[in-house]
């Protein structure tokens, strides 16, 4: 595997899910693969889970790991070609990428949506430069538009906890005080549509996700109706994707105080099929979900986060195998 971005990059999902269980049975059985190999994990944004789980996954495979927080200690990087660099940016991505690549065998990059230009974000301007100029396998650790390591871990978690062969999975928008990217819901939708589940998305009008990720998905604007009979509830906030009104891209469309009905509570969970609650974390309690629901025994947020180590290990293992 040379790039891990979309669900199609992982191939047959049943094979990938079986491989995830094989990793869980003994995560240290492939240490020969990573011997004398180095993973470089580059973070342009904060992280707790991705940083720790991906580093652990690479170590499980016997790799050396270097973690770089670009904004804490490295030079500020210019990303646009052609600019006169007389500002605060000391180095260009076009030098930094091949330099960083010279010290490692595989690269993971986290670079969130910047919300400056919808086109730049949706064309994956930053990650595509890493793919083009590093000459190394590149895996996305949340880019402008996708978070595939999260979606893969979510799928593993659903597979492990489902009680019927084709569970109903509901992804619901929930309120948040700040504008958040669409990467998590985009990838979750992409992966759920590829998996064998009954997938429903619910959100207020105006938050329609990009068709490249949700084409064919069932969208239900009435949250209570969407929750009926759900086996899994996946909560997430996202800002306006700008599909119908590009000028609204990255905006929070309503004052969150007026949207608190969307916060996942016992009221909505009561109409589900005793659903399991999921969220990628970090989560703001009593904005996205009430204390009660996230603390309930039906909440899967901790095993879901633990599965991030497993999804990362399958991906890194596949990359090592193809070096
Ligand atoms: C990020 C987001 O919503 O994309 C990361 C989630 C994994 N969340 C925040 O910035 C709070
Ligand atoms: N879920 C997730 O990616 O968490 P972090 O932002 O802490 O890495």
Image (tube, helix red, strand yellow):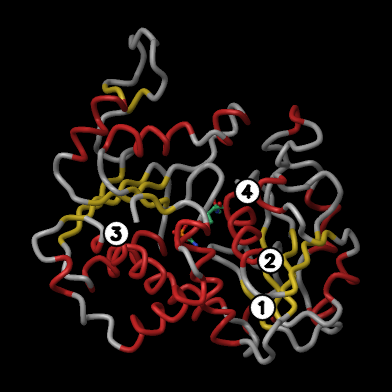
From the viewer's perspective, is residue 111 above or below residue 26?
above
From the viewer's perspective, is residue 101 above or below residue 258?
above
Kindly identify the residue that appears in the image at 51 percent across and 71 percent down: 13
- Gap between marks 4 and 3, in whole Å? 26 Å
Q: Which residue is mark 2?
A: 235
- Gap between marks 2 and 1, in whole Å? 8 Å
Dot 1 crowding, Cα within 10 Å, few <14, some 14–19, many 20+: many
Give the mark nearer the N terminus: 4 vs 2: 4
- Gap between marks 1 and 3, in whole Å? 32 Å
Give me the disc on residue 211.
none
Q: Quadrant of the N terminus?
A: bottom left
Q: Position of residue 254 (x, y in %)?
A: 82, 44
- Gap between marks 4 and 2, in whole Å? 13 Å
Q: Is mark 4 within 8 Å of ligand 1?
A: yes
From the viewer's perspective, is residue 54 above or below residue 39?
below
Mark 2 touching mark 1, by CB under 8 A? yes
Mark 4 touching mark 2, by CB under 8 A? no
Mark 4 touching mark 1, by CB under 8 A? no
From the viewer's perspective, is residue 267 above or below residue 47?
below
């Amino acid at each position: 595997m040379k790039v891990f971005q979309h669900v199609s990059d992982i191939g047959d999902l049943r094979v990938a899910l079986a491989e995830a269980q094989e990793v869980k049975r003994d995560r240290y059985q492939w240490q020969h693969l990573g011997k004398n190999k180095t993973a470089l994990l580059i973070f342009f944004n904060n992280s707790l889970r991705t940083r720790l789980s991906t580093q652990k996954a690479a170590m499980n495979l016997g790799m050396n790991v270097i973690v770089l927080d670009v904004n804490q200690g490295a030079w500020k990087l210019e990303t646009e070609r052609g600019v006169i660099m007389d500002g605060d940016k000391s180095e260009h991505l076009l030098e930094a990428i091949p330099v960083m690549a010279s010290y490692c065998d595989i690269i993971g990059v986290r670079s969130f949506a910047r919300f400056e230009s919808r086109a730049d974000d949706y064309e994956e301007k930053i990650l595509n430069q890493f793919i083009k100029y590093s000459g190394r396998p590149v895996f996305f650790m949340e880019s402008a538009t996708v978070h595939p390591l999260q979606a893969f871990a979510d799928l593993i978690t659903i597979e492990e906890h489902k009680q019927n062969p084709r569970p109903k999975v509901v992804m619901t928008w929930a309120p948040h005080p700040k504008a958040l990217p669409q990467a998590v819901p985009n990838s979750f939708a992409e992966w759920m549509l590829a998996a064998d589940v009954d997938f429903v998305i619910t959100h207020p009008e105006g938050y329609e996700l990009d068709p490249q990720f949700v084409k064919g998905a069932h969208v239900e604007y009435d949250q209570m109706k969407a929750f009926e009979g759900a086996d899994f509830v996946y909560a997430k906030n996202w800002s306006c994707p700008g599909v119908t009104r590009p000028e609204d891209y990255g905006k929070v469309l309503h004052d969150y105080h007026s949207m608190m009905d969307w916060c996942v509570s016992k009221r909505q969970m009561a109409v589900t099929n005793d659903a399991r609650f999921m969220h990628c974390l970090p989560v703001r309690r009593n904005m996205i979900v009430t204390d009660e629901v996230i603390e309930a025994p039906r909440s899967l947020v901790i095993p879901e986060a633990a599965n991030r180590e497993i999804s990362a290990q399958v991906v890194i293992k596949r990359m090592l195998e193809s070096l």
